[in-house]
Image (spheres, rainbow, N blue to C red):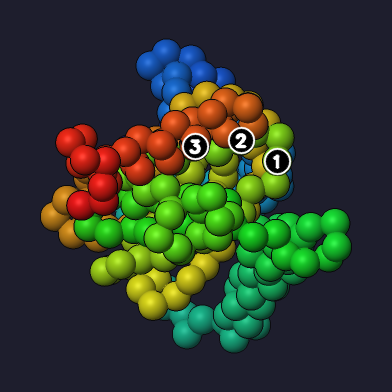
Amino acid sequence: MGRFWSILFLLVPILGVGVFVWAMAGLWPMAGHWLPENVNDHGHVIDNLFMFILILTGVIFIGTGIALFWFLWKYDSANNAAPVAFTHGSHTLEVVWSIIPAAALVFIAIYQMNAWADAKMRRPTLADGRVKPEIAEVTGRQFEWRIRYAGKDGIVGTEDDVQVVNDLHLPVDEEIVLKIKSQDVLHSFFLPNLRIKQDVVPGMKQFVWFRANKTGVYDIVCAELCGWGHYKMRGRITLESREDFDRWLAKAYDEQNQAQYTPATGEAE
């Protein structure tokens, strides 16, 4: 019976790898369970890093599973009449299996340095070398995303800002910079199709950037458990041409200003 359990242990890496391959192939019923479509010019860097780490850890996962199977099979008590022999271990072996994981982690840290710098440090710049200003400010709060665009003055954070909730519109084929912050607790601003994910920390103003290359409507989600309503903290991002974006922003600006005046006198309330 002991060898039956060793076979079950062997099925773990086999089924584990099989499920991943199944999902990557997009076959029913695993279709749609792999990475969402990438619509960011820079997203392939994140995808390549993800696949590299997945393959590296996958090899370790398979090797560990096979080793467990071999030990369970070889030293099954039902098939070994010899008495148990105890050992105090091997100092050399302990050093080796401490150094190898440490070396692997150092290698990953070095391998991903450019990806980290591109995503977190090398903010897009203008032709004159200045950092590119944000096109909008996104504020996470329980349980919605509040978005502010610059009004006629071109500055985010002034009285004429256009304000919307859970409805982010952005132009494609441009380097986009967003300022993100939290009003209350820790949130995580996650745009799966743009490969953007950034924890939003109360008291901090942070920035994310990307270059979308395909129009469409995609998800904005919170990837950090932020309270009882976390499940409904979901918005949408509409990627459109610059002309459509400008038209939408102008319309939103006019509608917001009209709402600030009484229909009888036309005077501000």
Q: Is residue 23 above or below residue 83?
A: above
Label 3's element? helix
Label 1's element? loop
The reply, left or right, for residue 194 in relation to residue 251 is right
Disc 2 to disc 1, C-alpha distance: 7 Å
Label located before the other in sequence (1 or 3): 1
Q: Which residue is mark 2?
A: 171
Tell me if I can see residue 120 in this picture.
yes
Disc 2 residue type (three-letter): Pro
Q: Which residue is mark 3?
A: 249
Disc 3 to disc 2, C-alpha distance: 11 Å
Q: Position of residue 165 (x, y in %)?
A: 32, 44
Q: Position of residue 160 (x, y in %)?
A: 43, 54
Which one is in front, 90 or 225? 225
Which one is in front, 120 or 94? 120
Disc 1 residue type (three-letter): Glu
Please tell me whether mark 3 or mark 2 is closer to you in this view: 3
Label located before the other in sequence (3 or 2): 2
Of all residues, the one furthest to the right in this rendering is: 128
Disc 3 residue type (three-letter): Leu
Q: Which residue is mark 1?
A: 174
